[in-house]
Image (cartoon, rainbow, N blue to C red):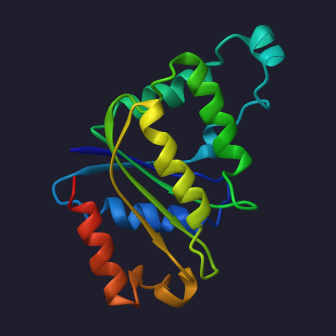
Amino acid sequence: MKIIALAATSSSKSINKTLVSYAANLVENSEVEVLDLNDYELPLFSEDKEAELGQPELAKAFFDKLGSGDVIMISFAEHNGSYTAAYKNIFDWASRIDQKVFQNKPMILLSTSPGPGGAGSVLAAATGSAPFFAGDVKGSFKVPSFYDNFDLQNNQFINQELHQELSSVVAKL
């Protein structure tokens, strides 16, 4: 099974990238490819830019990369209760190639933040909207207070209950 994993942020120190990488590697006998949204940076989407640029190669590459896996895992960072601009922009460009951005792939959606909300607002939005873009959401999970619950040095959960819950969600694949 090939898993395409990404953090829905452009942060170089993303705790969501840590989380999605950790979660993807819980799937036994899988190949994991972690995408970096910085590799798909494009001008802000608008109809004017689309008329000028058409379908940019980076948008096509992102769409094709999502299609190349058997499973998609995304961990969402939250900016002011919503998607990061980096994720929303590449998603908007990809949706103009084909509205079925997620290409009927099984998906696990995650989120985390330093605070107690665990980026739950954006996770709820993503979980609710993914089916409209041909995403087959098998499970979702948020990790509150990331730094209190995850040991970055040893790349493991401090909170074993959260580890077990995440393992259960990932097992739905």
Give residue 45's position: percent from left, percent from top: 75, 27
Compared to 89, does 81 lie above or below? below
Give residue 156's position: percent from left, percent from top: 38, 82
Residue 35 can be seen in this image: no
Name the residue nearer the viewer: 8 or 32.
8
Residue under the image location 51 percent in, 22 percent down: 99
The residue lying furthest to the front in this view is 128
Give residue 134's position: percent from left, percent from top: 40, 31
Q: Quadrant of residue 1?
A: top left
Q: How many marks?
A: 0
Q: Is residue 140 left or right of residue 129?
A: left
Q: Quadrant of residue 118?
A: bottom right
Q: Quadrant of residue 57?
A: top right
Q: Is residue 105 left or right of residue 141?
A: left
Q: Is residue 132 left or right of residue 76?
A: left
Compared to 170, does 94 lie above or below? above
Residue under the image location 42 percent in, 37 percent down: 131
Q: Is residue 145 left or right of residue 139?
A: right
The residue lying furthest to the right in this view is 48
The residue lying furthest to the left in this view is 29
Compared to 75, does 35 lie above or below? above
Residue under the image location 56 percent in, 66 percent down: 120
Residue under the image location 49 percent in, 47 percent down: 128
Give residue 70's position: percent from left, percent from top: 27, 38
Residue 94 can be seen in this image: yes
